[in-house]
Amino acid sequence: MVYSDAAKLLETAVARGVMFACAESCTGGMVAAALTDLPGSSAMFDRGFVTYTNAAKIDMLGVTPQTLDRFGAVSQEVARQMAQGALARSAAQIAVSITGIAGPGGSEHKPEGRVCFAIATTDGVTAQTQEFGALGRDKVRLAARDHALNILLAAVSI
């Protein structure tokens, strides 16, 4: 997301009186950093959760061990619970979550570059999976950050 797009996200959120929260795993706080790089971001960013381990997802966001056991950390089901947990534990009206395999590595069932996202609002939760491919750790993380910012912009623009 270029700076002008990020500025549009800030402008739209402020105009609508919307605050964001984020729950991040594979991006390790990159979304929160991108949002807070903007002057005036305190008007639209409430907080971020970096939950890299399963234990952190459970403790900080309320992800259930059963969901982690059944679907794995990189799943839309876990992304949904992460976003719901961030929304419930913040003053935000929109929460985004990111969980994925940045690499190196992956498996036949969960390849490198697979990232699951969710957006939670008081109206519900939507989730999606993006296959960025084996671009390398840095590029997958940047692509995931940018995608998260774009789906936040879409969510606040509705």
Image: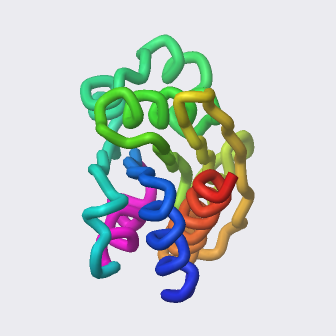
Quadrant in which the N terminus appears: bottom right
Report whether 132 appears left or right of 148.
Answer: right
- Magenta region: which residues? 24-37
Q: Quadrant of residue 60?
A: top left
Looking at this view, is 62 or 5 the one in front? 5
Residue at left offset 29%, top offset 28%: 55
Residue 153 colored in magenta in the image: no
Q: Quadrant of residue 87?
A: top left
Indicate whether 157 appears above or below 138. Answer: above
Looking at this view, is 150 or 93 the one in front? 93
Report whether 121 appears left or right of 18.
Answer: right
Residue at left offset 42%, top offset 15%: 65
Looking at this view, is 138 or 96 the one in front? 96
Report whether 99 appears left or right of 157.
Answer: left
Question: At which x and y percent is residue 80?
Answer: 56, 31
Residue 148 seen from this side: yes
